[in-house]
């Protein structure tokens, strides 16, 4: 089956009731036929469900779909994207280890790298996202992971995954890619050499702003290590949220194509408008990493960033003048969303740190939804007038 079909047709085995749509397995544990089966399952001599902190049919179905879409051998699901990031680090790093990361990472990932992991003597070095020689220089004897986001949130920086994966292979370290902004419909990092792919499923995988979720995809061997950490630390995804996410994936290919079509149209129109200082979108030829974007991405994705003339005040006025767009901290929803990262998601960074990751005070992030393009545009145009 091709990926679009797998996104729809991979399904937990039908029960005796022959349901067409998958049921919700809202159970914390599973019954054993006898003492011998119970022993064999715990001894991992036999495959099967024991307890929903370890596995659940709805979670397994979600992971089967994500593995198929990302081209991964195995996966693990968590209660949020940050639980996926933390479980990856927690499982694969020990005291004294070191991480090299692109500087432009999501705000909570930044907190994890700079404040939480150092409590266990795990250190990190940031590299400006496009300084490829600097990544090599930053790798030390004790470096275990090179971590990137592409496209980054909210700067939309694009990193050449193939180039960095070669460096990681040569140095014998793991290459981890947060693929939240693109989803596997737009890019499959494993094809470009990534060892581990991380998702905040909260965003496009859900696509309707209902649930939190996180997913880690990698080889069987790596997922076994993640499992060893996650089974006992408990970041499990609930069956209900897994059920929602798995149903959402049925429409992911269609949604990502339409989000990207709408976003490209809005970015193109914005770039022709007076009063707009600059517009950034991966599939606009003016994007500084356009060549890399078209090499590794199928579409440009649903996020557009831009800055209005007039700085912070003008940016705030734009947000206040919007009618259709929601002002909310999420992204990847069917509903268009506008945010001001400097005063919200990235407010914990100092102004200098924000500048380093390309977040100017007036930067606006638009998550373009699936409403009629003319309604989306009218709202943007009116708010800028
Ligand atoms: C790129 C990226 N990674 C990770 C996360 C964290 O995901 P969650 O909010 O599901 O914990 C986010 C959330 O916005 C994100 O944008």
Image (cartoon, rainbow, N blue to C red):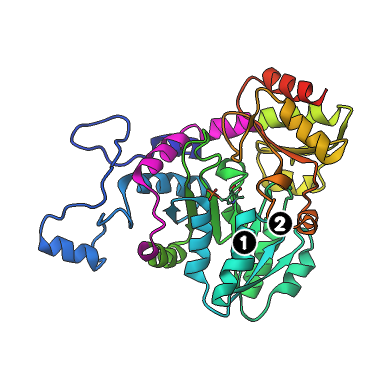
Q: Residue at x 76, y 54 (%)?
A: 354
Taking the magenta stretch, the answer to whether it contains residue 236 is yes
Give the camera-side residue of 178 and 366: 366
Secondary-structure class at tag 2: loop
Which residue occupies 72% across, 54% down? 159
Q: Is mark 2 within 8 Å of ligand 1?
A: no
In terms of image quadrants, where is residue 73?
A: bottom left
Q: Quadrant of the N terminus?
A: top left
x then y, percent, for residue 373 = 68, 21
| Left or right of residue 183, residue 316 in this image | right
Q: Secondary structure at mark 1?
A: helix
Q: Is residue 216 visible?
A: yes
Position of residue 195 relative to residue 360, above or below, is: below
The image quarter containing residue 374 is top right
Q: Main secondary structure of the magenta part?
A: helix
Q: With 273 as the anchor, is 105 left or right in this view?
A: left
Please report whichever mark, 2 or 1, sits nearer to the chain's N-terminal start.
1
Q: Is residue 129 left or right of residue 229?
A: right
Do the residues bearing badges 2 and 1 touch, measured as CB atoms within 8 Å? no
The circle drawn on residue 236 is none
Q: In whole angstroms, how far apart are the C-alphas of marks 2 and 1? A: 9 Å
Q: Which residue is identified by label 2?
A: 349
Q: Which residue sits at x=23%, y=61%?
A: 46
* CA neighbours of label 2 inside 10 A, class few (<14), some (14 to 19), many (20+): some
The disc at residue 111 is: 1
Question: In the figure, is residue 299 to the left or right of 236?
Answer: right
Residue stretch in magenta: 231-259
- Residue 10 vertical position relative to residue 53 in the rendered view, above or below: above
**What x and y, as percent, mark residue 362?**
80, 41
């Amino acid at each position: 089956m091709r990926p679009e079909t797998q996104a729809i047709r991979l399904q937990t085995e039908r029960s005796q009731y022959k349901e067409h749509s998958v049921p919700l397995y809202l159970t914390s544990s599973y019954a054993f036929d006898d003492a011998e089966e119970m022993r064999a399952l715990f001894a991992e001599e036999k495959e099967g469900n024991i307890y929903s902190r370890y596995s659940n049919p709805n979670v397994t179905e979600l992971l089967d779909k994500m593995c198929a879409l990302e081209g991964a051998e195995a996966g693990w699901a968590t209660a949020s994207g940050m639980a996926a990031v933390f479980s990856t680090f927690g499982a694969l790093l020990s005291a004294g280890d070191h991480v090299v990361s692109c500087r432009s990472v999501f705000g909570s990932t930044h907190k994890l790298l700079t404040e939480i992991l150092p409590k266990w003597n795990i250190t990190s070095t940031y590299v400006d996202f496009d300084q490829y020689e600097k990544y090599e220089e930053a790798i030390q004897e004790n470096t275990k992971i090179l971590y990137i986001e592409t496209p980054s949130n909210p700067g939309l920086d694009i990193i050449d995954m193939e180039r960095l994966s070669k460096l990681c292979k040569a140095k014998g370290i793991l290459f981890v890619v947060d693929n939240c902004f693109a989803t596997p419909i737009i890019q499959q990092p494993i094809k470009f050499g990534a060892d581990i792919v991380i998702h905040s499923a909260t965003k496009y995988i859900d696509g309707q702003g209902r649930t939190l979720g996180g997913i880690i995809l990698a080889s069987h061997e790596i997922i076994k290590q993640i499992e060893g950490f996650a089974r006992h630390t408990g970041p499990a995804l609930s069956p209900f949220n897994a059920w929602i996410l798995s149903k959402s994936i049925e429409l992911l290919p269609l949604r990502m194509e339409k989000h990207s079509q709408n976003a490209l149209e809005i970015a193109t129109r914005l770039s022709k408008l007076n009063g707009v200082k600059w517009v950034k979108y991966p599939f606009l030829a003016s994007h500084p990493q356009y060549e890399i974007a078209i090499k590794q991405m199928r579409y440009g994705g649903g996020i557009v960033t831009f800055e209005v003339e007039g700085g912070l005040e003008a940016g705030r006025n734009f947000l206040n003048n919007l009618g259709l767009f929601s002002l909310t901290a999420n992204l990847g929803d069917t509903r268009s969303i506008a945010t001001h990262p400097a005063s919200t998601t990235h407010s914990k960074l100092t102004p200098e740190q924000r500048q380093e990751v390309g977040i100017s005070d007036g930067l606006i992030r638009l998550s373009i939804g699936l409403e009629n393009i003319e309604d989306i545009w009218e709202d943007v145009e009116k708010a800028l007038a």
